[in-house]
Image (cartoon, grey):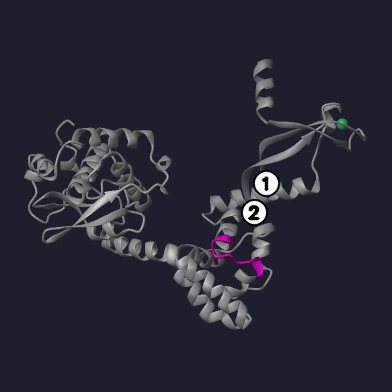
Amino acid sequence: MKGDMAMEHNKSLIRKIQMDCPLCDRIHEIEVRTRMTNIIIRGEEVEYEETYFLCPNSDKEEQEFVTGQMENENLLKARNAYRRNHGLLTTDEIIAIRKVYGLSQVDLAKLLGWGEATISRYESKAIQDETYDTMLRLIKENPYAVLDFIQKNGEKFSKRKKLELKQRIMDHLNEEGKEFLQRKSLESEYVDYQEPCDENGYRLLDIDKLETIISYIAKRVTHLYKVRLMKMLWYADALFFKEHGIAMTGLVYCHDDMGALPIGHYQIVGLEKVNTKMEEEYEYTKYHFLPNDKLDESILSDQEKDVLDRVINKFISFNAQEIVRYMHKETAYIKTKDGEVIPFCLAKEIKRL
Ligand SMILES: [Zn+2]
């Protein structure tokens, strides 16, 4: 029992530092510790991790203390815990939005038509209201919205500043804007599938994961073209569903001559982070899928990678016709008609891979 308690106590020890101890009034070794604690914010109990100093030389009653800076950081953590509980942007997320567009606290506040100190307060001591949070999210997700705000609140900036801001946003748009538009276009194909259901394998479309999965397959399969990739995506989703009761990507697949084909397949090929090379062959254009090294495979779980590896191993030596012929023998294909959505209750009956 004593041992357990000592361990429990040790867990929170972060490091030891030499400092001027206000309790002993001399320089000696002080422990920096953390622990979970509660605080009331806006009438609500919030749990967060606080950091404090502990003087091992003082008696048990009065051996803890905090500095002013530490207290501020603790409060910041508490407020961020509250924000997370309420689905509001945390301080770091607000700072990240500013950094993406290269805006100072004052510039961002002026841009959104707020008081000049508003952003500074949100980054240090106040929790934003939901309306403010919504506006921040809007510009986080949509660089075009930032241009709208420059149009609307531009008179708050000098002419030179306004031009400079516009240029910075345009640069950002060139990088992120295309991806944004293509994502919106793919998402619009999925408006009927905003709830988990048998058609999407009880998973909402996850474009980040889809892009990463395509890159993952392309890295391991050379000469990866559209027909084979689309089939492999279906097999990966079907197998994952069979084993885990949920699909991986959230794609909805239809019965097509060539097997399963996801809704929005043109948009998928067009996604900025899906690396394709157009190749002309006779009368038509082929899309050669290549890996995208900028995508982080660690967003895929071990279970997901395992399923992908098995699908890749199975079909790596198949050509397009072979994989199409293989898919034609699946129950999911036989029991659906041309153009119909292939439900996952049928997909899970795939042959053993
Ligand atoms: Zn001391």
Residue type indicated by callout 1: Ile
Q: Identify the secondary structure beneath mark 1.
A: strand
Where is residue 43 drawn, in percent x and y? 64, 54
Residue ID at (45%, 67%): 173
Where is residue 127 drawn, in percent x and y? 63, 59
Residue 140 drawn above or below residue 21: below
The residue under label 2 is 43
Q: Is residue 316 magenta?
A: no
Quadrant of the drawing holding the C terminus? top left
Quadrant of the drawing holding the N terminus? top right
Residue extending farthest right: 25
Please give the range of residues in magenta: 99-106
The quarter of the picture where residue 154 lies is bottom right
Residue ID at (32%, 49%): 210
Residue 247 drawn above or below residue 143: above
The residue under label 1 is 39
Where is residue 297 drawn, in percent x and y? 40, 42
Residue ID at (23%, 60%): 266
Q: Identify the secondary structure beneath mark 2.
A: loop
Give the foreground label among 1 and 2: 1
Front residue of 117 and 50: 117
- Label 2 crowding class (10 Å Cα cut-off): few <14, some 14-19, many 20+? few
The quarter of the picture where residue 6 lies is top right
Which quarter of the rendered image does ligand 1 occupy? top right
